[in-house]
Image: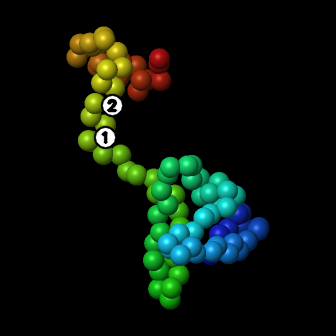
Amino acid sequence: MHYNGDMARQSTATLSVTARGQVTFRSDILRHLGIQPGEKIALDKLPNGRVTLRAAKPAGTIDGFIGLLAGKTRKVATLDEIREAAAAGWAGKK
């Protein structure tokens, strides 16, 4: 497996495969990919038996957004308050 630490330095890492088909990545490789414990790695198959690896960053979905703030506050904002807050946010005001 090849990975680039930065453009000036290239490094090769050799990984062992267990009987169950699993590999363990060294922490420096995970840091380079921006992978935290519990996150996923995306693997893209290329021709000639090659692959690319990258952090699998899920795209946000509307389903994931709906209810995001549910239960976080007891205040109910009116439509006018929501519009004012949105306008202030776009204007860079807090």
Answer yes or no: do the residues labelled 2 and 1 have beta carbons within 8 Å? yes
Residue at the far top in the pictured view: 75
Residue placed most toward the observer, 1 or 5: 1
Residue placed most toward the observer, 24 or 54: 24
Query: In the rendered view, would you say 46 is above or below 33?
Result: below
**Is residue 52 in view?**
no
Query: In the rendered view, would you say 94 is above or below 38?
Result: above
**Is residue 30 in view?**
yes
Quick check: 44 left or right of 10? left
Can you identify the residue that label 2 sits on? 68
What is the distance, in whole Å, between disc 2 and disc 1 at their CAs? 7 Å
Element at label 1: helix
Q: Quadrant of residue 27?
A: bottom right
Residue at 28%, 30% (x, y): give it.
67
Residue at the far front in the pictured view: 19
Can you identify the residue that label 1 sits on? 64
